Amino acid sequence: MRVVIAEDSVLLREGLARLLADGGIETVASVSDGPALVTAVLRHEPDLAIVDVRMPPSHTDEGLRAALQVRAARPDFPILVLSQYVEERYAGELIGRAVGYLLKERVADVAEFLEAVRQVASGGTVIDPEVVVQLLSRQRRGAPLDSLSPREREVLALMAEGRSNTAIAARLVVTEGAVEKHISGIFAKLALGPAPEDHRRVLAVLTYLGR
């Protein structure tokens, strides 16, 4: 796997590259601003970009805007966003777009971070649990989620973190069959019927996150 890193902190950039290398992942470019990210992705055609939300010159949303530029040129390109804080106004825009959204503190768990990198690169979505919690707290009363049972909510929360049925079953200490049954119940209660053009798992997570 080949990645591009966009992060203005030299120390974190180098640290990420070292962690990736130890995991057998090659960093083909390491940049410090948004325009350089766009150039690097188009030049090197990597499998994934790891992008900080806030970069020079204003340290607001340059990283995100550059990431969206990349996606305009390569619509399915996987991006793993790293942020110091939960950026609620950006998180909703990113969910469901084959991206990962993690707080930087998660990098300390190397195995989990590398798994997130691989999952996003393969087209999956990985959402930081803290992002899930904060977005969920903003949901209005009377939303479709009110019909879910406590166990179905647990299952959906783990789905929102990007976990597979196997991982959910292990976390909740139940069988995969039980997880599948809960997911079927979630789809039914959220009125997500089978449709070839829709991904019900992603749609359920979007509903959970208040989109």
Image: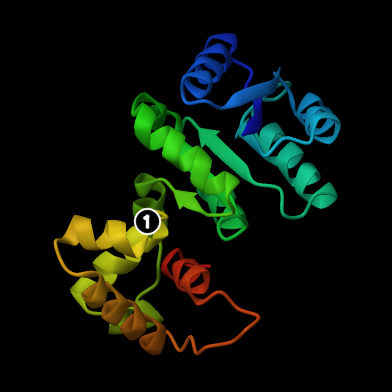
- Indicate left or right for 173 with 131 as reference: left
Is residue 86 visible from the viewing direction of this image? no
Q: Is 197 above or below relative to 124?
A: below
Examine the image and state in which quarter residue 171 appears. Answer: bottom left
Tell me the amino acid under the disc marked 1: Arg
Residue visible at 79% across and 36% down in the picture: 45
In the image, residue 174 lies at what x, y percent? 16, 67
Residue visible at 52% across and 25% down in the picture: 24
**Disc 1 marks which residue?**
163
In the image, residue 145 lies at what x, y percent? 35, 77
Residue visible at 70% across and 25% down in the picture: 58
Residue visible at 37% across and 36% down in the picture: 112
In the image, residue 128 lies at what x, y percent? 41, 45
User: Dot 1: what SS?
Assistant: loop
In the image, residue 197 lies at what x, y percent? 65, 80
Binning the other alpha carbons within 10 Å of mark 1 as few (below 14), some (14 to 19) or many (20 upward) gives many
